[in-house]
Amino acid sequence: MSLDKILAISGKPGLYELKTQTRSGFLAESLIDGKRLSVSIRHNVSVLSEIAIYTFTEEVPLREIFEKIQEKENGEQAISHKESKNKLESYFSEILPDYDEDRVYVSDMKKVIQWYNILQSKGITDFSEKEENSSEEEE
């Protein structure tokens, strides 16, 4: 499963997998407990493949940050997102040394680490970019 199908829904904890579209929005399934949720178009929804973190030079896609965490942890779980502010900042600076401290908050770091741990626990560990010629393979 690619990050194109993984959603973060504001006001809802954890991550969700996009299942199907409906007339008024879409149906998503929680990666934490498997419960299904009908999400209307009024909800603020972010697709993980579209999220990036600010650095001093560019915006780094979330998938690249997940790859760096995975490399650092040898495919295992990262530190807990409930660690102290100093621990989270130090961990994040190891993964992304040039992140912009003025625009990347501790709450953002917590989300990234929590999301990585959720994906890793569900066996979603392929964070590579989706190939362009996937439509040719389907034919």
Image: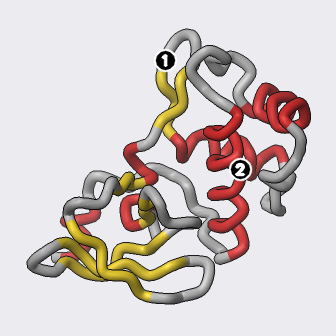
Where's residue 14, x and y in %? 58, 66
- Most foreground residue, 72 or 8: 8
Q: Tell me what residue is drawn at x 74 percent, y 52 percent.
A: 70
Q: Tell me what residue is drawn at x 51 percent, y 79 percent.
A: 30
Q: Tell me what residue is drawn at x 16 percent, y 80 percent.
A: 22
What secondary structure is found at the residue carrying circle 2?
helix
**In the rendered view, would you say 111 is above or below 27?**
above
- Most foreground residue, 116 or 42: 42
Where's residue 10, x and y in %? 44, 56
Q: Which mark is residue 23?
A: none
Amino acid carrying label 1: it is: Glu
Mark closer to the observer (2, 1): 2
Determine the residue located farthest toward the top in the rendered image: 56
**In the rendered view, would you say 49 is above or below 102?**
below
Q: Which residue is mark 2?
A: 113
Number of other residues with Cα within 10 Å of mark 2, as a class: few under 14, some 14 to 19, many 20 or more: many
Where's residue 133, x and y in %? 26, 57
Asked if residue 77 lies left or right of residue 135, the reply is right
**In the rendered view, would you say 7 is above or below 70?**
below
Q: Which residue is mark 1?
A: 58
**In the rendered view, would you say 10 is above or below 18?**
above
Asked if residue 80 lies left or right of residue 4, the reply is right
Render colour scheme: secondary structure
Quarter assignment of residue 77: bottom right
Mark count: 2
